[in-house]
Image (cartoon, rainbow, N blue to C red):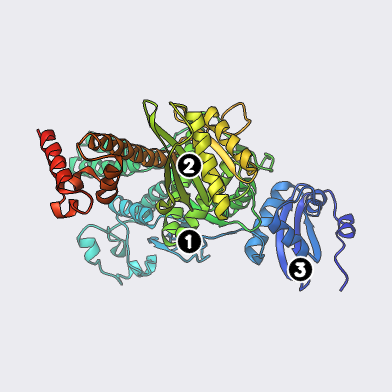
Amino acid sequence: MASFNHREALKNIPHKPGVYQYWDSNDRLIYIGKAKDLRNRVGSYFNNDLNNNTKTKVLVRKINKITFTIVDTEIDAWLLENSLIKRHQPRYNVMLKDDKTYPWIVIKNEPYPRIYWTRRIIKDGSKYYGPYASVSMMHAILDVIKELFPLRTCNLKLTPENIEKGKFRVCLEYQIGNCLGPCENLQSEEDYNANLEQIENILQGRISVVLNRLKSELEIAVNELRFEYAQQLKRKLDLLANYQSKSTVVSTSLSKVDVFSIASEQDVAFVNYLKVMNGTIVQTQTIEMKKKLDESDEELLVLAIPELRTRFESDSKEIIIPFNLSIENTEELKFTIPKQGDKKKLLELSQKNVIYFKKEKLEQYEKLNPEVRINRILSKMKKDLRLNQLPRHIECFDNSNFQGQYAVSAIVVFKDARPSKKDYRHFNVKTVEGPDDFKTMEEAVFRRYRRILEEGQPLPQLVVIDGGKGQLSSAMKSLKKLGIEKELTVIGIAKRLEEIYYPGDQYPMYLDKKSETLRIIQQLRDEAHRFGITFHRNQRSRKTFQTELTSIPGIGKITAEKLLRKFKSVKRIREAEQSELLEVLNTQQIKALLDFFHQREP
């Protein structure tokens, strides 16, 4: 089989808007895309300088044929692409994961129409409102409608002929006030349809229209002294006002707009949609999109918008988005990136929803797959800290001393973003006299990695130094002596403003205060500090007590060390039986030791 020649194929592709399709050697459709300029867009896939994505290179290698469809405008290309993807579902195209059937509220095309919910649309002239992403929201609307406007729920064929012949009798629903009895002509069709008109206003988000009409009727009823009817109207007003207060009213100045926002991770993205009518959010949905070719947020949003607008039957002329898309404003559609005002608040609300949804979804998934969470955190750290590899092994250094004495260093180790306490190490500083934190750091780093090299152990991918430029420079001196300064990444973290320093950089880097990367680094720093302080206190207490022991007649430095090595702590020495003490001391030394403890008792 002759290999595919993309240069020859490109000659036949015009510089016009349209949709292109890629086919493999088995004549299977594997990818569909849209373009403002077909030739430029298709040609970019075969440009190695522009295309560095591994997944896209795999796609390109499988292309055996290119077909295309020319359209008049970019908007037409956008809509055609969405339609073709839904129909053919090519392997390398992003698909909206959430494809379940949503419920609708239907006003049935029949005499005295019934209102109920359904998941099945029948093209028989009935009116459908929705779909509703939230079933509870849909039922809440139906409950309000039922309370406000009693309608029939039976499936009787209420034609004028059947009603005139007296074929039907009112049922229990009439007796309890849930129906006004149109089956026996106790409610006229005109009155029934007037209620339907009000219901349609509610379903379309025009609640204020219904409220104003009820207020007018209430005023007329009061003036005519029909107080019982007025009380019924007042109850309906309160019920509808209560429902409206639970709805998200944005602004009466916004008549009909769609709002979209996106939040993405490495392999998945989430898109939130708000449908606004008459100043009220009437529908909202967040969907998940699985990436196929490491698509950008812009590419994903361009795919999601027509799908969600089709699914929720939106004909809004204005679409609010968080950033520019490769689609220009036209007479049919206007894309808005708001900077302030009600539209900006709407976008922020959508962004809050999508971020919350993403967080919930990822937490659910990560609970079932802990390794996914680890890889996500490590990938985020790799990106934030500009690393060449995932920081699966991280070490952090911290120094402690007391007025220049008892200097110690602590090393804590994190593996896969979690403490590995069995790998923690601490040691006393040997070559530094006085409170010199830089020299102490230099010695600690040198001793640590000289030993690792001698034992042939793997080096960490990331080393965190507790301190600023000075401590970081000292650590780098030791790594250069060992010849491994290019084999690992070293950063310093300064406590005051949580600044991140890199070797040789004049200015620090600041991470988002809420980022997981900074949280892990802070956890490393705090754990190293805790571990170092604990060891330092023990050493200081041990050496202080050892000095006190050597002041006891008959107990020298070696004997004091033996005592501490056997019993580990002063408390255990104090509580030890004489038989245990005899393993280290003679009877005269034991007597002197007991006298010493007796003198120290309060």
Residue 425 is left or right of residue 297, and the answer is: left
Q: Does the rendering let one see residue 278?
A: no
Query: Given contact means CB atoms under 8 Å apart, are the residues at marks 1 and 2 in contact?
Result: no
Residue 549 is left or right of residue 294, and the answer is: left
The residue tagged 3 is 24
Which of marks 2 and 1 precedes in the sequence?
1
Q: Does the rendering let one see residue 382?
A: yes
Mark 1 residue type = Ser
Q: How far apart are marks 3 and 2 (CA)?
A: 51 Å
Q: How far apart are marks 1 and 3 (CA)?
A: 44 Å
Q: Distance between the residues labelled 1 and 2?
A: 68 Å
241 above or below 341?
A: below
Element class at badge 1: loop
Residue 72 is left or right of residue 440, and the answer is: right
Residue 559 image point, x, y percent:
27, 44
Of marks 3 and 2, the one in the foreground: 2
Which of marks 2 and 3 precedes in the sequence?
3
In this view, the residue in front, 368 or 8, is 368
**Which quadrant of the figure has residue 139?**
bottom left
Rendered image: mark on residue 396: 2
22 above or below 492?
A: below
Residue 318 image point, x, y percent:
58, 40
Label 1 CA crowd tier, 10 Å (few <14, some 14–19, many 20+) = few
Mark 3 residue type = Asp
The residue tagged 1 is 126
Q: Quadrant of the N terminus?
A: bottom right
Residue 183 is left or right of residue 527, and the answer is: left
Which of marks 3 and 1 precedes in the sequence?
3
Q: In which quarter of the image is the C terminus?
A: top left
Badge count: 3
Label 3 CA crowd tier, 10 Å (few <14, some 14–19, many 20+) = some
